[in-house]
Amino acid sequence: MIKSKIFIKSLLLFSSLLSFSSCKRASQNYVQKYVDLHFHLDGSITVDIARKLAALQNISLPEDDSELEKLLTLPADCESLNDFLKCFALPCSLMQTPEAIKESVYLIAENIKKQGVIYAEFRWAPQNHTLKGMSQEEAILAALDGLKKTDLKVNLILCFMRGQGNEKANEETLELAKKYLVKDGGVVAVDLAGAEALFPTKNYREIFAKAKEYGIPFTIHAGEADGAESVRAALDYGAKRIGHGVRSFEDPALLERIKNEAIVLEMCPTSNRQTAAVKNMDEYPFMDYLKRGIKVTINTDDMAIEGTNIAKEFRYMEEKFGLTLAQEKIILTNAVEAAFTSDQVKNQLKKELGL
């Protein structure tokens, strides 16, 4: 009887090891290094980073990690992008000094480097970090200092914010983007973020006309909370990349334009599910876009708020939609070629990714 039990335990152990080995081999059949083009700095403040930033500023936080995580992570009952945006209040409150900005850039970069990211573009709105007297320019300089502390390849995208009464703040962001614009290793582009359905993309024609005049590359959040017409407006302004673009399928002619103009869609599966940009993930258009030859990419959007990371996003797409290694290489090639960086860095990334 004893020998029988020992035999059974040994058999179970062998089966477990075999299963683990099979899983490990399976995971090696997919990419393990990543590029994340759509990554919000203030949406990526994890519990450990929040505590470090709070300690720098003598800010009190809940002692229990699970309680703090609830404050930093999207609740299960999120119904829209507007609900989603409320989650930025706490992380933004922790990023109101130059030292906090500098450390957040550095700590987040080190965090995602461990997850396999080899290149990322951190987007954020400097105007959201002036509540304690720090200027937009001081915030940008602090972020640039943060980049100097990490060896991960990271660039910065400055966001204009949708809203009312912040026109001067957006204009200041534009002028600072022009002042600090580089090909690589700093500020490389601008973006438009915020409540898309409440403040339509069509309202921001002038600021992007000026960005184009200044020669500043840009991406625009569109086709997430608002429909295909938002994406069309962004393309009319000259955007070569679209943040999300998930609802482009609402207009077949627009999809054809996106393909013909080689527009890159910065898609974020977990985010698109959580903000209800797509009601039913069985109908998520990513794979259809990919098969049509549209240049899609996979990104995290707001890593901490969503409780995700880039590896999880790729694994989700593999399990849910059968994404293959060959398709992942196409997706990563799209990301590298669309990155706001120098040709030299793009070549290095392709070599590292085996593309």
Image (cartoon, helix red, strand yellow):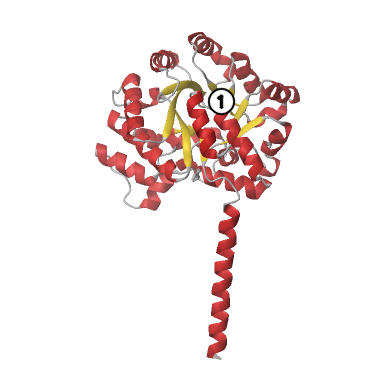
Residue that lies at the very extreme toward the right in this rendered image: 252
Residue at image point 55% right, 31% down: 336
In-image side of 223 versus 256 (left or right): left
Image spot of residue 109 (x, y percent): 40, 37
Which corner quadrant holds the N terminus?
A: bottom right
Residue 22 seen in this snapshot: yes
Residue 291's place in the image compared with 28, above or below, is: above
Residue 277 seen in this snapshot: no
Residue at image point 56% right, 26% down: 338
Residue 287's place in the image compared with 186, above or below, is: below
Q: Which residue is mark 1?
A: 196
Image spot of residue 196 (x, y percent): 56, 25
Which corner quadrant holds the C terminus?
A: top right
Q: In terms of depth relative to the viewer, which is nearer, 35 or 194?
A: 35
Which amino acid, mark 1? Glu
Residue 158's place in the image compared with 36, above or below, is: above
Image spot of residue 27 (x, y percent): 57, 53
Q: In terms of depth relative to the viewer, which is nearer, 313 or 70?
A: 313
Residue at image point 61% right, 29% down: 265
In-image side of 181 versus 145 (left or right): right
Image spot of residue 293 (x, y percent): 70, 31
Task: Specify few, some or many for label 1: CA neighbours under 10 Å numbering under 14, 14-19, or 20 or more.
Answer: many
Quarter of the figure with residue 277: top right
Residue at image point 53% right, 13% down: 208
In-image side of 225 versus 190 (left or right): right
Residue 299's place in the image compared with 250, above or below, is: below
As helix, strand or loop, the secondary structure at mark 1 comes to loop
Q: In terms of depth relative to the viewer, which is nearer, 16 or 195?
A: 16
